[in-house]
Image: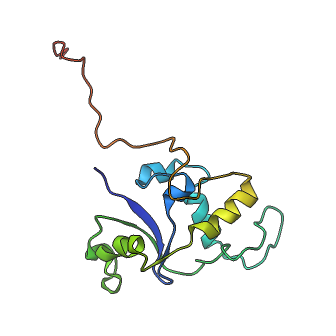
Amino acid sequence: MGQYWLPVDLSKREFIDPCKLDAGLKLREQAGSWPGTGTALVVLCAAMPVSRGGGDLRPHPAVGRWAGDRVALVGDYAEDSDLPAEFQASSIYKKCRSGEWTDVTEMVLEVLEREFGSRMAGNGLPRAVRTLAPDMVVVGSGGAEDPS
């Protein structure tokens, strides 16, 4: 089926939900979405407490929220050995989904919608996932003889 991934702030115990950013949960789906997971990480990780020049994002509590923190992409198949032992990597995805960790996606959505003029579903379901990565691809000629 494939592994599902969440960007997490290990220091603050926060995460962003890629589905709310119109991306899928697989790495390829997140890498190919715009604006999506990558853009959200730029917003969260910018070491920029205030705007300092042309092209900067306007101040918002999400801008720079994760700057300087320990941030990782953690999958639902993670094993404890994937990160330093203190983080217990195998439990992080479940903790995010159960509400033990804080979802800051809505905060980031405010910035993405304001700065990029995009409107996203923001309701836990993607408006449109344009780059789904299939779990399996069946190739064949519908029962005809094998061309090889």
Residue 110 higher or lower than 100, as above or below:
above
Residue 146 higher or lower than 37, as above or below:
above
Residue 92, percent from left and from top = 36, 75
Q: Identify the coloring.
A: rainbow
Residue 5 higher or lower than 44, as above or below:
above
Q: Quadrant of residue 132?
A: top left
Count of numbered tags: 0
Left or right relative to 112: residue 141 = left
Considering every residue shown, the one lying at the far bottom of the view is: 86
Q: Residue, x 42% and y 80% (percent of image)?
A: 100
Q: Residue, x 24% and y 22% (percent of image)?
A: 140
Q: What quarter of the picture does the C terminus occupy? A: top left
Residue 109, percent from left and from top = 64, 62
Q: Quadrant of residue 68?
A: bottom right
Left or right relative to 22: residue 112 = right
Left or right relative to 75: residue 11 = right
Left or right relative to 59: residue 97 = left
Q: Residue, x 35% and y 82% (percent of image)?
A: 87
Considering every residue shown, the one lying at the far right of the view is: 54
Q: Residue, x 47% and y 81% (percent of image)?
A: 13
Residue 107, percent from left and from top = 63, 70
Foreground residue among 42 and 100 = 100
Residue 36, percent from left and from top = 57, 55
